[in-house]
Image (spheres, helix red, strand yellow):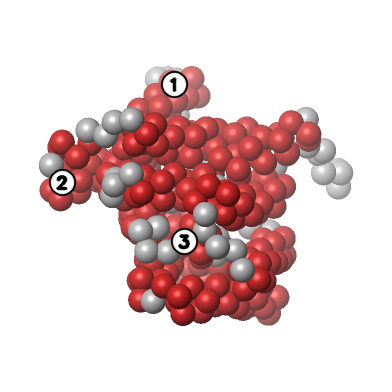
Amino acid sequence: MSAPRPPRHPYLGAALALLGAGLFATKGIVIKLAIAEGIDPLTTLTWRMIVAVPIFLTVGIIYYRRQHPKDGPRVLDGPTLIRTLLVGVLGYYVASFLDFQALAFISAQLDRLILLTYPFFVVLFGAVFMRRRVTPLMVAALLVSYAGIALIFAHDLSIEGKDVLLGSALVLGAAIAYGAYQFLAKPLIDRLGPELFTSLAMSAAGFSVIPHFLVTHPVSALAVTGPGFLLMLAIGTIATVLPAYCTSAAIGLIGSERTAVIGNVSPVVTVALAIGILGETFTPWHALGTALVLSGVVLFTRRARLKPVEPELEG
């Protein structure tokens, strides 16, 4: 048996993985700042799609033409296209909408930590629908992570009341939806490749978000100016497009498992930004809860050997 191939350019790959994780961590901060500017979560999500979808779609078309010439085998048939669009709506519309709405009620720190538990749901769906084995160590990792979330939840609930309950339920729904998305997306990405899949999935979500916005908002609500407009550009580029491509490049250089482990620093970055920029409190309960969540997730991902199915956009 041949030895495993060493990663190419490991330092560059690690740097890109760190950069991608750090940029992903800005999402909750940008949404919170937008709310402070009077921009509601659905408007922010709509702007995210307006900015990001054309970029992903352009990249997908270029990739498809290069990798799949007209005289080559056909990888995108009707059923595959329909499944890809539906999975994209689940991952980038349903999960994103729930996550964005949650940030109107809870701290960016708690939101990020609850969302981080989506790999547990990927394994749960695998166990239920594919009869994959769930080990006692996986269950222990789950209990450790949710013990940490419970600590922070109990602290915030005692101070901020029922809003914490609603916000936590919303982001838990986002984690479940994103876990289902990852579970369903894997065979589609194997067939289409991450670039084409992401382009189609994001486009489907964009064409779902915009009608939702138009039904509930006047078109004039998109007319944001000044700091609000800069935040809308940031949610589409800094918090979505750039980290997706950084993560994709990192996976190509150091592999998906190493990239996933490095990506676990993202919640720490979110906590630091939430404290430094948003002025959120960070008590010993938050410190202990964060440590437990991260310990459980790291233990889970390393032992379960979960591999991200694509450059993640995290809902």
- Classify 274 as above or below 249: below
Q: Nearer the viewer, residue 191 or 114?
A: 114
Residue in the picture at 40% in, 58% down: 103
| Residue 232 position within the rendered picture, expressed as x and y whole percent measured from the top left | 36, 36
Q: Nearer the viewer, mark 2 or mark 1?
A: 2
Q: Quadrant of residue 253?
A: top right
Residue in the picture at 48% in, 48% down: 29
Q: Nearer the viewer, residue 204 or 240?
A: 240
Q: Nearer the viewer, mark 1 or mark 3?
A: 3
**Residue 190 seen in the figure:** no
**Residue 167 seen in the figure:** yes
Which of the marked residues, 1 or 3, is nearer the chain's N terminus?
1
Q: Which amino acid does the dot numbered 2 rest on?
A: His
Q: CA distance from mark 2 to mark 3?
A: 25 Å
Residue 217, which numbered label?
2
Q: Which amino acid does the dot numbered 3 rest on?
A: Ser
Q: CA distance from mark 2 to mark 1?
A: 34 Å
Q: Which residue is mark 3?
A: 107
Q: Which amino acid does the dot numbered 1 rest on?
A: Ile
Q: Secondary structure at mark 1?
A: helix
Whether residue 49 sits left or right of residue 160 in the image: it is: left
Q: Which residue is mark 1?
A: 62
Which of the marked residues, 2 or 3, is nearer the chain's N terminus?
3
Residue 211, which numbered label?
none
| Residue 38 position within the rendered picture, expressed as x and y whole percent measured from the top left | 29, 47
Q: Nearer the viewer, residue 225 or 144?
A: 225
